[in-house]
Image (cartoon, helix red, strand yellow):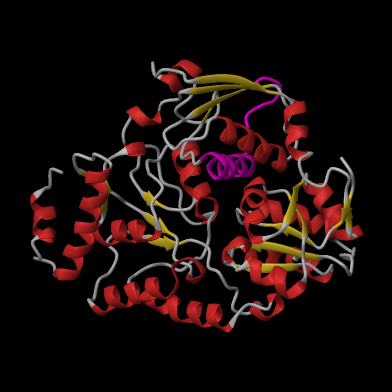
Amino acid sequence: MHLTASERDILNGKHGAALADVLREQVGVGEFFGAERFVEITNAHFMGDREVFGRAGSEYLHRLAAAGLRVRVPTTRNAQSVDLEQAHLLAQSAELVDGETETRPLLRSLGVATVNTCIGYQSVYQPRFGEHVAWGDTGTVAYANSVLGARTNYESGAAGLAAALTGRTPAYGYHLDTHRRANVRVRVTAPLPDLADWGALGGIIGERARGYWNVPAVELVHRDGPLSDELKHFGASLASFGSMAMYHVVGTTPEAPTFEAANGGRTVVDEFEVTGADIDDFMHRDLPDGGPVDLVVFSGPQVSFFEAGRIADRLQGRTVADSVRLLVTTNGSVCEALREQGQLSAITDAGGIVLRGTCWYVMDPAAQRAHFGWTNLVTNSAKLVNIIRAHGYAPALRRTDECLDAALTGKVAAR
């Protein structure tokens, strides 16, 4: 890699051995991906939850803090693995609780804002078009690249923190024009009335065109451009099922006024159509005959203020079935806004639990399944459906109102 004078100073230890080691790790990543140089960033967002990085990650943070390092750009943390005030409700282990209690001040000593959210692009910071950032988390990266036109790769927790500490990241992948051009063309005739439909669409495209370097361009036939929450669920599902970091919606996202503009002459490797029947088939995969439900979860990504408001309106004056646990996850700022609007109490008075600063799938859901005996789970998040099977659950993707009906009745209807 070609290094600037200031980068060579860091590598040669002018700013301390610890920062030199961090940049050396970044050089290794850059050389692996064929990067010729670094690009300076303005913002970083990384995954720093104890459930993922464990004791080794904690020791790494201690070493960085002991060396006196601090981030050089505004930096936020993704969702944590514990809501400290409500951990007992989900029988979370003392190890996770103690780990989060230890991690939070460590991150703050490095200058990291522990906002604990995977929807910072809806509630904390929106990078401008063309801005280079270093973000982690599937849905976060897909939203930044696709909807905002910012530039980032999927950064691991360590890589995202390294970029924050040095203020730069290797210039490869989605920092470059070449990789941002569409090479998959998808014509969508499905009506997509609900967030779950957008998640199903992401799952269908992701499964068929899986690959980090593939970029689908979606052409909608029967509906206007999608809203923020719809794009959020689509991108998170596309990333989960397909490991994709970017997409275009023709006529909606900033780099796709037309398909030709989004494609930029890149070879198209696949072209297909997604119909309403395809969406229905995707949702029919799980619990097609209906049945009892143990758990209804709105999470993965965290819900926005407007998503939570819709849930609150449906639950106002009603009661969740005794046999069901209803979980909603969001961040602190959304939670406080809901409290001010009186909508938080509408959910909790109905028997729901609103978890703050978490995403449920990083809260050790396998341990919760073993403790509570949960099996059947209903959600409107296709991303969560894809992830949670590995933890022993039988999940089903349903539209938002169907999920709420399941929470209120204790069973999900057949499809």
Residue at position x 22%, y 76% from top? 67
Is residue 39 visible from the viewing direction of this image? Answer: no
Location of the N terminus by quadrant is top left
- Residue 253, horizontal then vertical, whole percent: 51, 31
Q: Position of residue 407 (x, y in %)?
A: 84, 59
Task: Name the spot of residue 335 as percent of width and height, x first.
Answer: 64, 65
Verify whether residue 170 appears in magenta.
Answer: no
Residue located 61% across and 61% down the image: 361
Q: Is residue 346 above or below residue 33?
A: below
In which quadrant of the rendered image does the C terminus lie? Answer: top right
- Judge left or right: residue 38 versus residue 267: left
294 or 403: which is nearer to us? 294
Residue 309 position, x and y percent, is 73, 55
Left or right: where does residue 272 sit relative to residue 309? Answer: left
| Total numbered badges shown on the rendered structure | 0
Whether the magenta-drawn stretch holds residue 236 is answered as yes
Q: Residue at x 19, y 64 (%)?
A: 21
Q: Is residue 259 above or below residue 356?
A: above
Could you tell me which residue is drawn at 23 percent across and 76 percent down?
A: 68
Q: Main secondary structure of the magenta part?
A: helix
The image quarter containing residue 156 is bottom left
Q: Nearer the viewer, residue 275 or 14?
A: 275
What range of the chain is rendered magenta?
220-242
Vertical arrangement, residue 259 with respect to residue 79, above or below: above
| Residue 66 at least partly seen | yes
